[in-house]
Image (cartoon, rainbow, N blue to C red):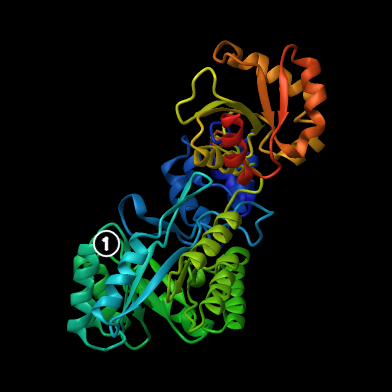
Amino acid sequence: MALTGVQIFKLLPKTNCKKCGFPTCLAFAMKLAQRQASLDACPDVSEEAKATLGEASAPPVRPVTLGAGDKAVKMGEETVLFRHEKKFVNPPALALEIKDTESDDAVDAKIQDVVGSEINRVGQLLRIDAVFLNNDSGDAGRLASLAEKVAQKAPETAVIIGTENPEAADAAIKPFSGKNAILYGATEANAEKMAEVAKAAKAVLGVKADGLDALSSLTEKVKSLGVDDMVIDPGARSAKEMLEYNTFIRRAAIKKNFKPLGYPVINFAQRDDALHESLVAGLGIAKYASIVVVSSAEKWKNLALFTLRQNIYTDPQVPMQVEQKIYKIGDPTPDSPLLITTNFSLTYFIVSGEVENSKVPAHLAIMDCEGLSVLTAWAAGKFTGSKIANFIKESGIENEINHRELIIPGYVAILSGAIEEKLEGWKVTVGPREANALPAFLRSAQAA
Ligand code: SF4
């Protein structure tokens, strides 16, 4: 049973030393009770208290890792139902299904789709995270040979093996032993054997059942067989079922601390139509899936899903921002242009990307506006003529450039007079409103 904040408080050192990041032991205890803090944050907690609190303070959704190395994906550990309460912790993995009935050429192309899916967006590397190798043929030999192929051609990619046949599972999981692969396909009928295979390969077990009651009983059974790391599939295949089951599972885990459903959820979004598939996958991303399986990886679809995932899993309480400083784009000289904008990450990455595209080396002044975009920062009084002038003076850029011209975003053209007033001897040039017009703007300014 879950402990209350006061019960937890009684077990803490009660020194109010603040090392946990909270002002008092009681504040920390309250957060532990709400599962919004981890017991590890208190370095002075006794072993006895750890043993008592261990279960009570465990995250309601068990942390499970898929894959190994730099591309490993952490799942679970979520503590809230809604993103405005506290951030969602671990973005769901996207897994591309490869059926073992597909031709060798199609399999090779799909492996390449996964390996080549990585993009850098706003400073984060985003990719299709895993291959879901599905034993559609029922042929254990075919599954094992494709598993070998995936292990060779995409050695860093996480793998999910999909089969209900323990012998086929045993052969196919071998190349990924110890790499946190998922063995998906444990059912009421095969649970004992699949648990043995998963334990031998140190794999996560994917448990599937028809409905939540059957799933809860099955996870209890699998746990009693000595398997702790699971991902769960309640059998939802329609968008409606996914929404209902995923929501019920998250509520049961977080609000009721119902351990049998406190595992990462795997959703299957495969559809014949790519647009339809992206909508269903988007639903899984938005509503509590930890793995979403898709059947194809068109670049447009990847971009839409990556962007959705990245935005939902950004901490709403922490603005995405970059450091205030003068960035050098290309290899600027003292005669290169100087541009200014705010330190909202998206603004920085888009503007710096477009300056780079222009092939005109430049100095890019990024001013701390608490992570706000240009117009919002201007409206909030954080991107004003006098503040910009102070920043330019204090940045030291005047000692590095020969000219005194500052290019400002077109949306704040209104600031040009105020900046020139405060920055004596400077000329302010109004740049384009949209960053994608910067390459043409910079090139024509250079040619002039
Ligand atoms: S670190 Fe431990 S002892 Fe210190 S305030 Fe936090 S809970 Fe209390």
Residue at horizontal 77 percent and vertical 22 percent from the top:
419
How many numbered dots are placed on residues in this image?
1
Left or right of residue 129, residue 139 in this image? left
Does residue 71 lie above or below 424 as drawn?
A: below
Does residue 274 lie above or below 139 as drawn?
A: above
Question: Taking the image as four quarters, which one is ligand 1 found in?
Answer: top right
Label 1 within 8 A of ligand 1 by Cβ: no
Left or right of residue 116, residue 375 in this image? right
Residue 439 at x, y percent in the picture: 57, 41
Q: Can residue 182 be seen by looking at this rendering?
A: no
Q: Quadrant of the C terminus?
A: top right
Residue 32 at x, y percent in the picture: 58, 49
**In the rendered image, which residue does mark 1 sit on?**
154
Q: Toward the viewer: 217 or 250?
A: 250
Q: Quadrant of the N terminus?
A: bottom right
Q: Can residue 114 be seen by looking at this rendering?
A: yes
Residue at horizontal 49 percent and vertical 82 percent from the top:
271
Residue 133 at x, y percent in the picture: 31, 75
Residue 201 at x, y percent in the picture: 23, 67
Classify mark 1: helix, strand or loop.
loop
Q: Amino acid at mark 1?
A: Ala
Q: Toward the viewer: 299 or 339?
A: 339
